[in-house]
């Protein structure tokens, strides 16, 4: 039996509606529900007034009298705008620094071919597997000695410790998929390694760079342990730490403001993914080519 005949028979299995419902539509509907339900719950809770939140009656999945009081409290009566700015600043700078170091490291390991390059590439990736809950103890001593405690620069200094290893490994795989003959032609024409990297490799690696950048930005945006350890002032906190520490007073949880903060904090990452999802997928695909 030919491969084409097998494919045709396989597609014929989905010709009837009941089979499509069971094999395609129902699993897809379950997946979409599980994926989007947390966002729906955040939206409902953030616009639900306190009397409905604290009431034991009524429908918990719907809002009778929606309100924006929780957003007003979050934006005008807390330091949330400062937390958001700190998160954006730290994430952008840490992502840029990590990508710069990762590009240089990945290109050197893949193209310069020095002794022990493969072992170094593997060790860099293994460094990513070290839990941040272990690293923050020695890193705290370094942050204190440098006088960076309770500043955004403490986070910018420590975030690359877990961003660079995976980004380097990802870019190593993508650089490996670029034909080396292009660089050989440039070397014959007298181009330097930096010129080759800047004018040939990086333009061809845009999907990989976007993929690594989204990964680094997302981890920086959502990071909690380092931000909780190295920052204590309210005006210096990031969104993940500020929402949890400032909107919970003892055993009192301001659920409306908490969900509003979580919703606003998740929107930038969701927007970035929606714009660059094709580059992100192609970057991951290129990273596993051999």
Image (cartoon, helix red, strand yellow):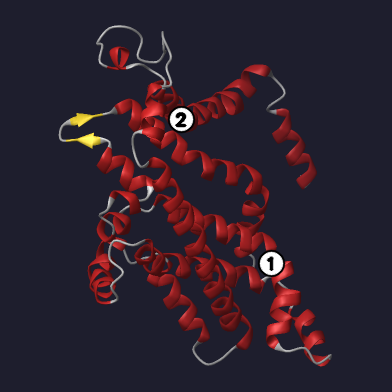
**Residue nearest the viewer, comparing 12 with 228:** 228
Query: Mark 1 falls on what kind of element?
Result: loop
Query: From what the image shows, is residue 182 above or below residue 279?
Result: below
Q: Are marks 1 and 2 in contact (CB under 8 Å)?
A: no
Q: Position of residue 136 (x, y in %)?
A: 27, 65
How many angstroms separate mark 1 from mark 2 (CA)? 33 Å
User: Residue furthest toward the front?
Assistant: 76
Considering only order in the chain, which callout, 2 or 1, is on the residue closer to the N terminus? 2
Q: Residue at x 53, y 43 (%)?
A: 268
Query: From what the image shows, is residue 125 above or below residue 274?
Result: below
**Residue nearest the viewer, comparing 54 with 273:** 54
- Lateral position of residue 161 relative to residue 114, left or right: left
Q: Position of residue 56 (x, y in %)?
A: 24, 10
Q: Residue at x 25, y 43 (%)?
A: 245
Tell me the quarter of the image containing the C terminus. bottom right
Mark 1 Cα-neighbour bin, 10 Å: few <14, some 14–19, many ≥20: some
Query: From what the image shows, is residue 75 above or below residue 281?
Result: above
- Lateral position of residue 168 relative to residue 65, left or right: right
Query: Mark 2 falls on what kind of element?
Result: helix
Quadrant for residue 162, please give it.
bottom left
Q: Which residue is mark 2?
A: 39
Q: Residue at x 50, y 68 (%)?
A: 98
Q: Position of residue 190 (x, y in %)?
A: 80, 92
- Lateral position of residue 270 relative to residue 220, left or right: right
Q: Which residue is mark 1?
A: 205
Tell me the quarter of the image containing the N terminus. top right
């Amino acid at each position: 039996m030919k491969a084409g005949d097998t494919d045709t028979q396989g597609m014929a299995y989905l010709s009837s509606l009941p089979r499509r419902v069971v094999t395609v539509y129902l699993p897809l509907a379950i997946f979409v529900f599980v994926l989007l339900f947390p966002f729906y719950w955040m939206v409902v809770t953030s616009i639900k007034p306190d009397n409905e939140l604290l009431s034991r009656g009524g429908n918990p999945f719907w809002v009778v009298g929606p309100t924006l009081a929780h957003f007003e409290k979050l934006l005008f009566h807390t330091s949330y705008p400062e937390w958001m700015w700190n998160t954006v600043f730290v994430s952008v700078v840490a992502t840029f620094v990590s990508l710069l170091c990762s590009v240089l490291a990945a290109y050197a390991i893949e193209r310069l071919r020095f002794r022990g390059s493969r072992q170094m590439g593997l060790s860099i990736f293994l460094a990513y597997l070290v839990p941040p809950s272990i690293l923050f103890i020695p890193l705290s001593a370094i942050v204190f000695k440098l006088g960076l405690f309770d500043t955004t620069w403490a986070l910018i200094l420590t975030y690359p410790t877990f961003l660079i290893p995976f980004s380097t490994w990802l870019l190593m795989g993508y650089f490996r998929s670029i034909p080396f003959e292009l660089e050989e032609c440039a070397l014959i024409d007298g181009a330097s390694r930096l010129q080759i990297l800047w004018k040939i490799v990086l333009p061809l690696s845009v999907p990989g760079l976007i993929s690594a950048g989204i990964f680094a930005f997302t981890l920086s945006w959502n990071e909690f342990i380092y931000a909780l350890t190295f920052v204590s002032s309210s005006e210096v906190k990031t969104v993940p730490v500020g929402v949890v520490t400032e909107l919970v007073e003892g055993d009192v949880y301001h659920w409306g403001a908490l969900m509003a903060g979580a919703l606003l904090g998740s929107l930038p990452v969701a927007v970035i993914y929606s714009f660059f999802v094709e580059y992100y997928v192609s970057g991951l695909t290129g990273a596993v080519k051999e």
